[in-house]
Image: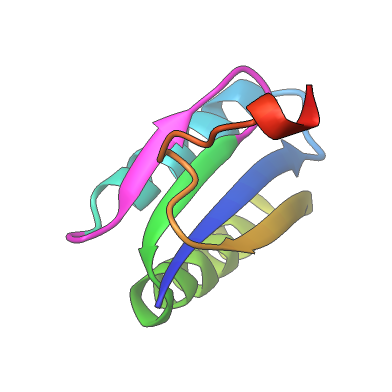
Amino acid sequence: MTFTVEISCYPLTEDYLRVVDAFIRNMAKYEGIKTITHHSSTLVIGEGVDVFAALQTEIERTFTDEGKASFVMKVLGGDLTETVDIEQYA
């Protein structure tokens, strides 16, 4: 099953942009996973087994290499980059 994970990384360090950038760049290296970066979060999209394995590896790497950080994420089924018709809710 395809999942979309919206994730935000909040490193507890003054050099937070470098840590966030490293996390996003590392996530983008995985085959079969799309990463789409927005201003306050990143979408990680792909098959669940691939997405969650990559997230586990990169979150652990952040904690090991950088120390304390907070990750906030939403997990949704499907590829949320697909267009959704919201006219019925207008």
Pinpoint residue 77: horizontal percent, then vertical percent. 55, 66
Pinpoint residue 89: horizontal percent, then vertical percent. 78, 31
33 drawn magenta: yes
Pinpoint residue 75: horizontal percent, then vertical percent. 65, 62
Foreground pick, 65 / 89: 89
Q: Relative to 13, does residue 53 appear above or below in the rendering?
A: below
Foreground pick, 28 / 38: 38
Could you tell me which quadrant the C terminus lies in? top right
At 20% from the left and 61% from the top, the residue drawn is 32
At 17% from the left and 60% from the top, the residue drawn is 31
In the image, farthest residue toward the bottom: 49
At 65% from the left and 30% from the top, the residue drawn is 86
Number of disc labels: 0
Q: As drawn, is 21 to the left or to the right of 19? A: left
Please report the bounds of the magenta region as a residue range.
31-41
Q: As drawn, is 83 to the left or to the right of 5? A: left
Q: Main secondary structure of the magenta part?
A: loop
Pinpoint residue 34: horizontal percent, then vertical percent. 31, 47
Q: Relative to 67, does residue 48 appear above or below in the rendering?
A: below
